[in-house]
């Protein structure tokens, strides 16, 4: 699939997910196994891609619920090498939907790409009667070819989302992703990309807490584990037992370094949990408040019990803090 068309080459990296899933029956959209079909076969199933200068590479073959540092490192390593190649115009990644927003965010933070990086996925397995993967892949290629400038975006169900804003919001609908208040960056309409707003590093309305630096990619690739940051939820009838148990764990290889709280509303936290979090903070653990609300952000104000997540969702705030701690 290689060609000499310098500067035009698209690279497609496969990591598994439902887009590469297979079920025993074609009518089964939920009882399938993710990560069964090779990325080469996914690409071959879209005839419109046959004439394009493509390179495909199978980086992993997993259900993205099991995503973690080793696959992120393999992806970041491969992406960095391909993005550095002047023959490559952009890189696509096929991925499961469950942790897509986390991978998109991590890649944006550690790579700060200058070329388009487009992640895509599917909600139905490749074996479905009517799979959504081929259309999503075709749309992602259209976005990769028409995007100018660099940043990590997610393409699903005809929408383009920024890494910073995107979240999976539905368990089975084909349009399972949403960009909250920011809205999508663009739509894909019969192969054309209709932009709604500037296409930069995630349309940050807040400064990202962990700004990428040249050292970050190097440290990320060399890390044996990310600094340990746990996620806890504030809820009615909460107490501080979970936080105290976390803080009290013997500290072998990965001592607790941070806690992100999926707080209620505008960063409010159950008073019993606040007590335990203050104890953790006093012992040197960073505590960051994100909101468990699907929309809005924690608006900074003097009454906040702890630092806020700069508009990041709980799962992304967890990663941002881990990356910040990685930089020491
Ligand atoms: N569990 C699957 C995954 O994330 C779900 C999907 O891809 O839609 O790999």
Image (cartoon, helix red, strand yellow):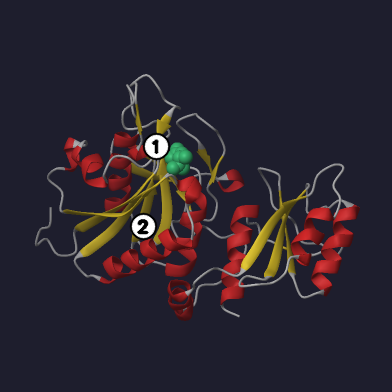
Instruction: Tell me if the residue at label 1 has its CB under 8 Å from ligand 1.
Output: yes
Q: At which x and y percent is residue 279?
A: 86, 68
* Front in this rendered view, residue 198 or 324: 324
Question: Residue at 55% of width from left, 34% of height from top?
Answer: 170
Q: At which x and y percent is residue 168?
A: 54, 41
Circle nearer the viewer, 1 or 2:
1
Q: At which x and y percent is residue 13?
A: 30, 54
In the displayed structure, would residue 161 be above or below residue 130? below
Question: Residue at 47% of width from left, 80% of height from top?
Answer: 215
**Alpha-carbon span between mark 1 and mark 2:** 17 Å
Q: Answer with left or right where residue 180 lies relative to residue 65.
A: right
The quadrant of the picture showing ligand 1 is top left
Q: Earlier in the sequence, mark 1 or mark 2?
A: 2
Displayed quadrant of residue 246: bottom right
Displayed quadrant of residue 324: bottom right
Secondary structure beneath disc 2?
strand
Q: Answer with left or right where residue 192 lies relative to residue 256.
A: left
Callout 2 crowding tier (Cα within 10 Å): few <14, some 14–19, many ≥20: many
Asked whether the beta carbons under mark 1 and mark 2 sit within 8 Å of each other, the answer is: no
Marker disc for residue 122: 1
In the displayed structure, would residue 320 be above or below residue 93? below
* Front in this rendered view, residue 21 or 104: 21
Secondary structure beneath disc 1?
loop
Q: At which x and y percent is residue 120?
A: 38, 45
**Disc 2 marks which residue?**
117
In the displayed structure, would residue 183 be above or below residue 283? above
* Front in this rendered view, residue 213 or 69: 69
Question: Residue at 28% of width from left, 45% of height from top?
Answer: 142
Position of the C terminus by quadrant: bottom right
């Amino acid at each position: 699939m290689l060609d000499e068309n310098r500067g035009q080459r698209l690279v497609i990296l496969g990591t598994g997910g439902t887009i590469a899933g297979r079920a025993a029956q074609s009518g089964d959209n939920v009882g399938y196994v993710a990560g069964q079909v090779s990325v080469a076969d996914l690409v071959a199933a879209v005839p419109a891609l046959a004439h394009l200068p493509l390179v495909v590479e199978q980086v992993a073959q997993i259900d993205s619920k099991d995503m973690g540092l080793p696959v992120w490192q393999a992806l970041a390593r491969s992406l960095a090498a391909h993005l550095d190649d002047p023959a490559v115009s952009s890189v696509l990644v096929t991925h499961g939907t469950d942790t897509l927003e986390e991978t998109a965010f991590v890649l944006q933070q550690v790579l700060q790409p200058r070329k388009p990086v487009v992640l895509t996925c599917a909600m139905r397995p490749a074996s479905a009667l009517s799979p959504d993967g081929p259309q999503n892949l075709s749309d992602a290629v259209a976005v990769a070819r028409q995007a100018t400038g660099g940043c990590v975006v997610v393409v699903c169900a005809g929408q383009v989302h920024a890494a910073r804003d995107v979240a999976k919001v539905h368990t089975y609908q084909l349009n399972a992703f949403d960009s909250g208040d920011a809205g999508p960056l663009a739509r894909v309409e019969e192969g054309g990309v209709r932009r709604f707003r500037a296409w930069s590093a995630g349309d940050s309305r807040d400064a990202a807490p962990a700004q990428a630096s040249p050292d970050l990619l190097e440290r990320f690739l060399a890390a044996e584990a990310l600094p340990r940051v746990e996620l806890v939820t504030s809820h009615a009838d909460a107490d501080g037992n979970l936080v105290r148990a976390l803080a009290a764990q013997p500290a072998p290889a990965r001592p607790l370094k941070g806690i992100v709280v999926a707080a209620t509303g505008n960063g409010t936290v159950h008073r019993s949990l606040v007590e335990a979090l203050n104890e953790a903070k006093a012992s040197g653990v960073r505590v960051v408040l994100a909101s468990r609300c699907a929309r809005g952000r924690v608006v900074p104000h003097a009454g906040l019990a702890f630092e806020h997540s700069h508009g990041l969702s709980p799962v992304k705030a967890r990663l941002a803090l881990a990356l910040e701690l990685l930089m020491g």
